[in-house]
């Protein structure tokens, strides 16, 4: 029966499925990077502190990381088209909330809903394409799907900058609603024409305990990372969160080794090439999102390069377009060979790029920056082009869906941790230098600690209020220190990224052994 339905898509019907999934995945990828260009404007508009600003990204990334692996199982039980439509609806509701957001609580709710919707869309759309597309055209269709994601990542910062500069940061989410409406209309036609064969498996058991343990573990870990420098790394809150994360992670491993249908098949990790792919994509996403996050905050800062959002998006094109072009072309030319050297050299390119970027200051001309961004784009592009294929080739065909879900989880988790650690490094440098500047004031303020917290962690309104409470001479000294620390914080983040990329290069070289990855039968 499924074969008969599949044969009916030999005409042009499968193109509707491809169009709907591509439009939806463009929205998912576009939202991942477009918002990074808009963060400074969102911070000013909603009066967000540095911690809330990080969670504007992390709420989206974490909810997607936790749920993307389970959405494939939901699709098998309830139907691919149904779960896909639910994902479109949840993402659209989140986008509406973001358009209307007037404070941190609403924008964080909206971003969380978008992450849940993104998990359903990204987790189900490859399966939709696979079952609806004729076999001889399937590889081309899936290649177009993955190329769309890379393209969306690449143009996201520019589109986000144009919309923020010309209209408002809210326009980014309004575009989501328009594109999702088009995808939903196409999907209604797909359902009416029965273009997607559905083979439901109602007997599948969802590993809800595994989902809950993974959610609590990742959430507690990232929250401890982002909030540790505020509450204190040895505070009860931080230590309890890390303990909860560790206990739940251990319980997750035990649970997955005992259940009959685990969320994550731990046997995958017996294959070193799969381990290399999963950890490599964690590092690649960490570096990708970390650099775009830190770069946008730096180049748009009034005390730094003072670029507009659209200028910031344009300035990132050497990075994003290099990444996009390599993600499309590298597999064609490099897939017949061992992935060990291209991936290792790509990570080393990231080491070199970040080390060169650490020389950037508020006085650095763009002519000395763009070619360093190209080097970074080469490194990330090679990783995104080669690592997922390497990992999936190490698994049997019947495990490809779950194996892909685990790699996607690593991608979104890596992006979330990259933003969190970038914030930690930046905050530590800010805190150290602002504390020194406060200590040099004459007289030293009696509420020096509260002043430090307001200047480092506070919203713009908190900073303005703190400066207003100082004498004009002391306020000028603090303003000068805050401008100087922008350069130092950016340098610190770039140095940290270079170290992480070096660790990734070593792991890639050690884990990717032998010749060409095993070709599936």
Image (cartoon, rainbow, N blue to C red):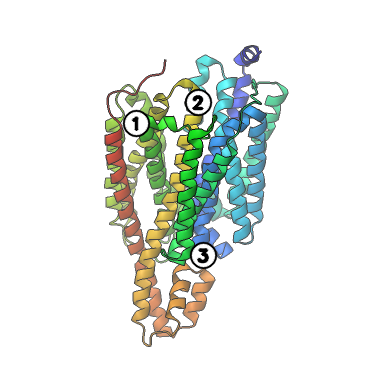
Q: Which residue is mark 3?
A: 49
Q: Secondary structure at mark 3?
A: loop
Q: Which residue is mark 2?
A: 142
Cβ–Cβ under 8 Å for marks 3 and 1: no
Q: Is residue 437 left or right of residue 300?
A: left
Is disc 1 surrounded by few (<14), some (14 to 19) or many (20+) residues within 10 Å? some
Q: Can residue 36 be spotted in the picture?
A: yes
Between the C-alphas of marks 3 and 2, the distance is 40 Å
- Residue 289, horizontal then vertical, whole percent: 43, 48
Q: Secondary structure at mark 1?
A: helix
Foreground pick, 377 / 200? 200
Q: Is residue 356 left or right of residue 138?
A: left
Mark 3 / mark 1, whichever is N-terminal: 3
Q: How many marks on residues?
A: 3
Mark 3 / mark 2, whichever is N-terminal: 3
Which mark lies nearer to you, 3 or 1?
Answer: 1
* Residue found 34% across the figure and 75% down from its top: 436
Which quadrant of the rendered structure holds the N terminus? top right
Q: Secondary structure at mark 2?
A: helix
Foreground pick, 302 / 441? 441
Q: Which residue is mark 1?
A: 272
Which quadrant of the rendered structure holds the C terminus? top left
Is disc 2 surrounded by few (<14), some (14 to 19) or many (20+) residues within 10 Å? some
Question: Image height check: is 311 above or below 328?
Answer: below
Mark 2 / mark 1, whichever is N-terminal: 2
- Residue 118, horizontal then vertical, whole percent: 57, 40
Between the C-alphas of marks 2 and 1, the distance is 25 Å
Foreground pick, 94 / 420? 420
Q: Is residue 476 left or right of residue 460?
A: left
């Amino acid at each position: 029966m499924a074969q008969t339905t599949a044969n009916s898509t030999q005409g042009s019907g499968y193109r509707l499925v491809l169009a709907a999934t591509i439009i939806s995945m463009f929205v998912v990828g576009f939202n991942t990077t477009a918002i990074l260009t808009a963060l400074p404007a969102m911070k000013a508009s909603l009066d967000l502190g540095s911690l809330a600003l990080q969670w504007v990204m992390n709420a989206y990334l974490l909810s997607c990381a936790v749920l993307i692996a389970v959405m494939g199982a939901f699709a098998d039980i309830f139907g691919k088209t149904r779960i896909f439509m639910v994902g479109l609806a949840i993402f659209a509701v989140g986008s509406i909330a973001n358009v209307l957001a007037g404070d941190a609580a609403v924008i964080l709710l909206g971003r969380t809903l978008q992450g849940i919707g993104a998990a359903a869309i990204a987790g189900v759309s490859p399966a939709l394409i696979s079952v609806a597309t004729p076999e001889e055209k399937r590889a081309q269709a899936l290649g177009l799907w993955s190329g769309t994601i890379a393209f969306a990542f690449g143009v996201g910062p520019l589109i986000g900058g144009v919309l923020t500069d010309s209209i408002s940061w809210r326009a980014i989410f309004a575009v989501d609603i328009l594109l999702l409406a088009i995808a939903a209309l196409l999907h209604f036609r797909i359902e009416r024409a029965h273009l997607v064969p559905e083979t439901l498996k109602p007997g599948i058991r969802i590993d809800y305990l595994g989902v809950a343990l993974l959610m609590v573990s990742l959430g507690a870990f990232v929250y401890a990372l982002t909030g540790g420098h505020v509450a204190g790394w040895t505070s009860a809150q931080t230590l309890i969160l890390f303990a909860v994360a560790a206990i739940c992670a251990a319980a997750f491993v035990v649970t997955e080794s005992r259940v009959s249908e685990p969320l994550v098949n731990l046997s995958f990790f017996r294959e070193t090439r799969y381990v290399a792919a999963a950890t490599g994509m964690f590092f690649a996403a960490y570096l990708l999102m970390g650099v775009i996050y830190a770069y946008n905050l730096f180049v748009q800062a009034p005390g730094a390069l003072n670029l507009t959002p659209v200028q910031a998006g344009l300035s990132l094109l050497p990075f994003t377009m290099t990444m996009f072009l390599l993600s499309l072309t590298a597999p064609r030319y490099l897939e017949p060979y061992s992935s060990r050297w291209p991936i290792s050299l790509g990570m080393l390119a990231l080491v070199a790029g970040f080390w060169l970027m650490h020389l950037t200051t508020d006085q650095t001309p763009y002519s000395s920056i763009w070619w360093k961004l190209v080097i970074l784009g080469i490194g990330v592009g090679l990783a995104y082009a080669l690592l997922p294929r390497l990992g999936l080739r190490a698994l049997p065909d019947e495990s490809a869906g779950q194996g892909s879900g685990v790699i996607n989880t690593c991608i979104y988790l890596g992006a979330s941790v990259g933003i969190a650690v970038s914030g930690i490094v930046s905050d530590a440098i800010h805190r150290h230098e602002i504390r020194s500047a406060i200590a040099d004031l004459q007289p030293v303020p009696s509420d020096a600690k509260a002043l430090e917290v307001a200047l480092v962690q506070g919203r713009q309104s908190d900073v303005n209020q703190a400066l207003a409470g100082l004498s004009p001479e002391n306020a000028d000294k603090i303003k000068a220190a805050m401008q100087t620390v922008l350069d130092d914080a950016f340098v610190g983040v770039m140095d940290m990224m270079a170290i992480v990329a070096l660790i990734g290069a070593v792991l890639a070289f050690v884990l990717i052994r032998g010749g060409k990855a095993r070709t599936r039968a």
